[in-house]
Amino acid sequence: MTSIYENTKRMRLLRPALLLFVISLAISCATTMPALQGFLNSSDSSLNQWLDVRLNVDLPEVRIMHLPLTDAFAGMKLAITRADAPVESLMVTLHANEVTRRQALWLLAQKYGLQITVEHVQGQPSYISVSK
């Protein structure tokens, strides 16, 4: 009877540890997934260089329209499609270490079902467009 009690007690202690391990493994796998081939490719070499910088991303519920104000995406030129107003107020969360900005944006696109593209306007710098 005592051994059954001890096994039950041990299992109660192991469950949270196992759950934490599985969650951390899932997060690790998600952040090591490479961005889709050709995602946000641009003829603008300075934009490509900016997108390929590796960094740590720590976004704890940030409005998507405020991404350029964060450390990870400072300097990003962003436009949100006006026809898709719910995107403006969308709160996004992402915690990833040693990823490129391109990969971080791809992870956000996958997680929140966003269309993120590079747009070009004649005579203007390229910008990132976000829509749902």
Image (spheres, rainbow, N blue to C red):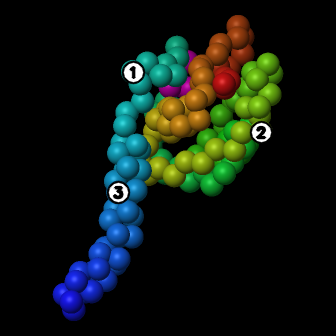
N-term-proximal mark, 1 vs 3: 3
Q: What residue type is labelled 1?
A: Gln
Q: What is the secondary structure assignment of the residue under circle 3?
A: helix
Main secondary structure found in the magenta portion: helix
N-term-proximal mark, 2 vs 3: 3
Residue at coordinates 35% horizontally, 69% vertically from top-left?
Answer: 15
Residue at coordinates 80% horizontally, 28% vertically from top-left?
Answer: 85
* Residue to which mark 2 is pinned: 89
Q: Which amino acid does label 2 sit on?
A: Ser
Most foreground residue, 2 or 99: 2
Asked whether residue 46 is drawn in magenta, I would say yes
Q: Which amino acid does label 3 sit on?
A: Val
Extreme front residue here? Answer: 1
The relative height of residue 18 versus residue 1 in the rendered view (above or below) is above
Q: Nearer the viewer, mark 1 or mark 2?
A: 2
The relative height of residue 132 versus residue 21 in the rendered view (above or below) is above
* Residue to which mark 3 is pinned: 22
Q: What stretch is highlighted in magenta?
A: 44-48
N-term-proximal mark, 1 vs 2: 1
Residue 37, which numbered label?
1
The image position of residue 124, as x and y in percent, is 72, 16
The image position of residue 79, as x and y in percent, is 73, 26
